[in-house]
Image: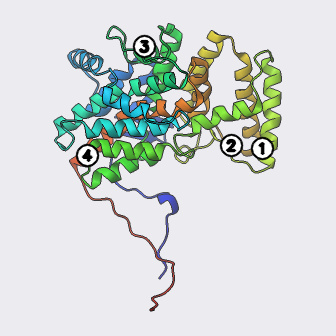
Amino acid sequence: MTEQIYKGLAGVVADHTAVSKVNPESNSLLYRGYPVQELAAKLSFEEVALLLWNGELPSTGEKDEFRAFERSHRALDPRVRAAIDLLPLDCHPMDVGRTAVSVLGANHPLSEDSSPEAELTKAKELFAAFPAVVAYDQRRRRGLELVEPREDLDYSQNFLWMTFGEEAPEEVVDAFRVSMVLYAEHSFNASTFTARVVTSTLADLHSAVTAAIGALKGPLHGGANEAVMHTFEEIGIDTAETREDAAARAKAWMEQALAEKRKVMGFGHRVYKSGDSRVPTMKQALDAMVEYYGRGELMGLYDGLEAAMGEAKNILPNLDYPAGPTYHLMGFDTEMFTPLFIAARITGWTAHIAEQRADNALIRPLSAYNGPDERHL
């Protein structure tokens, strides 16, 4: 009898989770039962993080306590900075993020303490510390000095402050906050499942997150938002071009790419059958950035590619498609887009790590052997 193979584990239900789900009836991504578009419209990223970790929306006291904790753990650890400075400027920023988390774990006094209290402390500290890694890495690649964090700014404001050395306008801060909320969690995706596999061996939290970053680096997962911007750059961004002309040029590019059977990133999703429910909210943030910066030609490229893919393949965009140009307009270098994904997804990963730890079973699937029959020397 031939075993049935579920390539890529497609259709396999590996475990229960209470962290998130896609509701097929409303096509909404739910965090602990709440539609993510509602959370993105009304809550800070800090509040969403607490929801993912604790299962319920925080009280005023819980918000205040976490706000103080997070702001006191933002500074770039000198040992992490020293490790980053040893890495070449032409390595991928995801390598920097992976190394930084590993260094933080190796130096953490609670590294081998897997109690729920210790795990939550480490998750909160990692949430607070990682923005400085992304900000410093972009600045060092540009030949700029470190910008110290400010405790009078919220998470999103401070992230942008440390990256660019100036206070961001309210419109930019809000668009960034929305992106962080939308990227925070997405059930048993490749990197989250990786984190749970590592956790199932009873490895420490930082090892699980480091492994998840490795999974996220791939262009079929987290690297897609970066790939979207590379597509825009390949087509060519002409700031003097009208939106209509840019759309026509992008449409022609897409038609040729599809004729050549090229893989175009930013479209389609294994989970969603009626389009990624996060896209409308992220598209609103992109619209706000396009209007704020007066960059209609970028939206022309966006519209042209989306229309051509829809007409040819009836495939809709996923979250990475509007997120890429949004981060570009904010001033982030293209290679930094996936590290921004890390900063957001630390919340979801660590929520899943805690869930796996609480009801653990070693994740060890079987395989169907298709090599040579037994043979002898």
Compare marks 3 and 2 and give the one earlier in the sequence.
Answer: 3
Report which residue position mark 1 lands on: 257
Quadrant of the frame with the C terminus: bottom left
Label 1 element class: helix
Q: Amino acid at mark 3?
A: Gln
Q: Position of residue 295 (x, y in %)?
A: 69, 15
Q: Position of residue 274 (x, y in %)?
A: 59, 40
**Image point (59%, 14%), residue name:** 288
Compare marks 2 and 1 and give the one earlier in the sequence.
Answer: 1
Report which residue position mark 3 lands on: 157
Report which residue position mark 2 lands on: 264
Q: Position of residue 292 (x, y in %)?
A: 62, 10
Compare marks 3 and 4 and give the one earlier in the sequence.
Answer: 3
Residue 171 visible here: yes
101, 120: nearer the viewer: 101
205, 247: nearer the viewer: 205
Tag 3–tag 2 contact (CB < 8 Å): no
Residue 318 visible here: no
Tag 4–tag 2 contact (CB < 8 Å): no
Label 2 element class: loop
Real-space CA distance between mark 3 and mark 4, rounded to the nearest whole angstrom: 31 Å
Q: Amino acid at mark 4?
A: Asp
Q: Amino acid at mark 2?
A: Val
Residue 14 lies, with reference to residue 350, above or below; the image says: below
Real-space CA distance between mark 3 and mark 1, rounded to the nearest whole angstrom: 39 Å
84 to the left or right of 217 = left
Compare marks 3 and 1 and give the one earlier in the sequence.
Answer: 3
Compare marks 4 and 1 and give the one earlier in the sequence.
Answer: 4
Question: Which of the two discs, 3 and 2, sits closer to the camera?
Answer: 3
Tag 2–tag 1 contact (CB < 8 Å): yes
Report which residue position mark 4 lands on: 204
Label 4 element class: loop
